[in-house]
Amino acid sequence: MSSSAALQHMGFALIVFLIAAILTRLTINLNIRDIPNERSSHQKETPKSGGIAISVSFTIGIALLYGFADVVRLPENQFLVFVLIVFGLLFASLADDLYDISPLHKFVAQFIAALFFAGLVASIQEVWIPFIGVLQLGAAGMALTVLWIVFFMNAFNFMDGINGLAGGGALISGTCLAVISFFAMAPFVYLSSMVLVAATLGFFVFNFPRGRIFMGDTGSQFLGFAFASLAVLASTDGFGGVSIYVVPVLFLPFIFDVVYTLARRAWRQRKLSQAHNEHLYQLLTQCGWSHVQVSSLYFAYFIVCGITALAIQAADPLTRVVLVGAAVITMLGHAIFVHHTVRFHNRLSETPL
């Protein structure tokens, strides 16, 4: 990439950032309030639906890229379906922010979005399995794609609970994905990731550290879908040569927290569909850690996972699996640390002054 092209990309990202920042400020004025409840990590009513700024500015960005940058074009029908899905999710998640729709209706919207993407845009085609090699998935790839997108949308939503955590994770992982996809010759994923980072940053400056606005479902649902779909496109023939393991590793701090918490609740025979505040990041806040401290800790994990993802992209298939395992072990260490912190906090709480 020439220096002039790099400057053009940076200038374009700056424009998207400014659009997102302006839209975020306008959304604060809309005053769609998040009212605290017993599961909340905040104590006062705060404007939400900041994700409107993220999704709208992202859509404007990729529409401009589609119109003026031939190198990043998807086939027209696939691009239009992708944009329609984004707008459909925007309205569905905004309805949830406004009217608190039921989990079933939310799941139906997620499933429809994932099904349209897998059927009309792209789906996972193959995976590499140790001692077996490359496994062509065929029709099963479509089902796996739907499951992946729905799972990741929910995982992202579950982790959007304190100031900066979801937005900061998206910024770090999105930047790493842009770098990896650039060198993997995946221009659509590279520039889409760049636009996604710029759009998220326009919201993030209002969310961290003070929490002047939350992203709400309009942000968490959209970002979950966007990164899950970019993971599929990046690994699909014709769109890019990024390893299918890259995005899951980039977002392993979120994925591990969700899977570990669900497994722990199942072990303790808790109802999995019941709302709770038992995620690892929530346990730290209950121990007295501030939002800034918890989010900063997770940012460190995101950086480690970003470095690991870069190594995965450059490695042979077997080494990639080993690196994924090493990243999982790192997050297991995080879980041990959190539970040790909880036990120490409980002992202090029970000690009379």
Image (spheres, grey):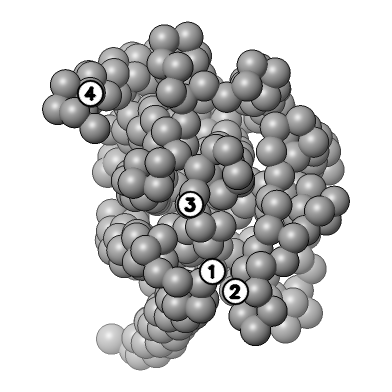
Circle 1: element type: helix
- Given this view, does label 2 or label 4 mark the residue nearer the observer? 4
Q: Nearer the viewer, residue 174 or 159?
A: 174
x and y, in percent, of residue 140 in the image:
83, 56
In the image, what residue type sits under mark 3?
Answer: Val
In the image, what residue type sits under mark 4?
Answer: Ala
Q: Could you tell whether 232 is left or right of 323 in the image?
A: right
Up the image or down, 49 lies above or below 168; here it is above
Residue, disc 2: 260
Q: Could you tell whether 289 is left or right of 154 in the image?
A: left
Question: What residue lies at 31% left-to-right and 63% top-to-bottom?
Answer: 307
Circle 4: element type: helix
Q: Is residue 338 visible?
A: no
Residue, disc 3: 242
x and y, in percent, of residue 75 in the image:
63, 21
Question: What residue lies at 47% left-to-right and 9% top-to-bottom?
Answer: 67
x and y, in percent, of residue 125 in the image:
70, 52
Residue, disc 4: 5
